[in-house]
Image: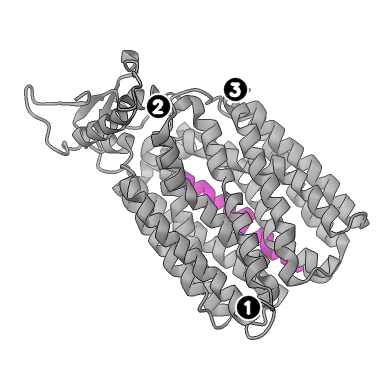
Amino acid sequence: MTSRAEGQAGAVAPERVAAGTVIDTDISARLDRLPFGRFHTLVIVALGITWVLDGLEVTLAGALVGALRKAPMSFTEFDVGLAASSYLIGAVTGAVGFGWLTDRIGRKKLFFITLALYLMATAATGLSWNIWSFCLFRFLTGAGIGGEYTAINSTIQELIPARVRGWTDLVINGSFWIGAALGSFLSIALLRPEWIDPAWGWRIAFFVGGGIGLVILLLRTWIPESPRWLVTHGYAAEADRVVTGIEKRFTDEGITLPPPDASRRLRLKVRSHTPLAEVAQAMFVTSRRQTVVGLALMIAQAFFYNALFFTYALVLERFYDVPGGDVGWYLLPFALGSFLGPLLLGRLFDTVGRRPMIAATYGISAVLLAVVGLVFRADLLGPWGQTMAWMGVFFFASAAASSAYLTVAETFPLEIRALAIAAFYAIGTGIGGVSGPLLFGTLVETGSRDLVLVGYLIGAALMAVAAVVGAIWGTAAEGKSLEDVSKPLAAA
């Protein structure tokens, strides 16, 4: 065992040592010196599927607009915006509540609870009978996804080796768009009146989402608790067993592991929880610069993505007379560009660096958004041309949005990591994500290209501000251990 408790000389550490006991550990060094292997791939698949689910949910909600506006639901444009905002408000609520619990009772318990909530609520959405029941179930679905974000982001950050953390995190967040593509295909298949009654097609789409969630529950049964969380909360022996099991996966494949760096041993004072006063001190005093950066990045990307993507189906129907059943075809290029961005640009966040890449992706997105918005106002392109233009914008914007989650997750101490992710997600989504769909839904309903352009320019301005903030105050976290980027509050 390479984690030991100090206190009574010669005493055998219990399964959980008492709060206040100092533990000397090399758990972090052992995890970061591992090569990227099959274990990490399985973790990414089992946990990163959260973003696929979110992409599926968001795309279905957008692509099914045409069906929901018909009898028996008969939604208006405002109703569509209200439903989108209900999902996002739920995500904010779930992120904060579950984020607090994730830091307190562990990552693993929460990513089972939040996924269970998601699959039940999304299936219930398919049983909605009016706008209010639909909004309630969308709220609960969002709460599950919001809780997933906090539990999963923190778990993945704490299991992936430092040298590939940036690329891995961006690709995982970018996998949202795999779900978006799946949602597009589902909407195309289920909204064809010659294949299935439209009154049932949209309901079946949500049932499918719940079924996928059930499969994922089974995939997660073997994922271990975060060893970093375990050792900080006094479970040193369990943390050692988890890491030993991970190491055995590599040695059984014939890989010789280098010894952990002895200089990176940590002395941590065990705590049962972190008081909220200490959380506030860390976020607004000790790490206030990181807080400013996190807020700027999160608010900008939340407004950008939720405003544009949630309402693009309305734009296609209102300005280009695209039938609701065909909307899914136009969302597929969005999904492709948005997944390729993090996939192809992600490695640069580990090599070129976090700060220059954050500035570049946010800045380019701002410029392209303004340009494409002007093209839309001038009505220079048809629906496919406009969609291809958005595909180029989202190539950079998706990498930018993913880097916001990466930044928040790695620049705050382990003890408040999940709550920090939740807080920034909540504030960013509350300000940018909830207001964006409502604003754009209202602007699109006017039928005025000039007013829709105003919305696009607001998004471009927010992205430009975030680019400047990230360039000046961003953290150069590439290749560094989480504990070197942000010292644990429990460090003794």
* In-front residue for pair 90/427: 90
- Find the residue positioned furthest to the left: 10
Mark 3 or mark 2: whose residue is earlier in sequence: 3
Q: In 3D space, how far apart are the residues under numbered discs 1 and 2 (Cα atoms)?
A: 54 Å
The crowd level at tag 2 (other Cα within 10 Å; few <14, some 14-19, many 20+) is many
Majority secondary structure of the magenta segment? helix
- The picture places residue 413, in percent across and down from the top left corner, at 41, 34
Q: In 3D space, how far apart are the residues under numbered discs 1 and 3 (Cα atoms)?
A: 50 Å
Q: Which residue is drawn at 78% across and 71% down?
A: 323
Q: Is residue 218 left or right of residue 171?
A: left
Q: Does dot 1 land on a helix, a strand or a loop?
A: loop
- The picture places residue 45, in percent across and down from the top left corner, at 46, 45
* In-front residue for pair 67/403: 67
- Could you say which disc has been placed on residue 351 in the image? 3
Q: Does dot 3 land on a helix, a strand or a loop?
A: helix
Q: Reply yes or no: does residue 204 show up in magenta.
A: no
The residue tagged 2 is 483
Q: Which image quarter: residue 236?
A: top left
Residue type, mark 2 in image: Glu
The residue tagged 1 is 196
The residue stretch that appears in magenta: 421-443
Could one spot residue 430 in this view of the protein?
no
Q: Is residue 246 above or below residue 448?
A: above
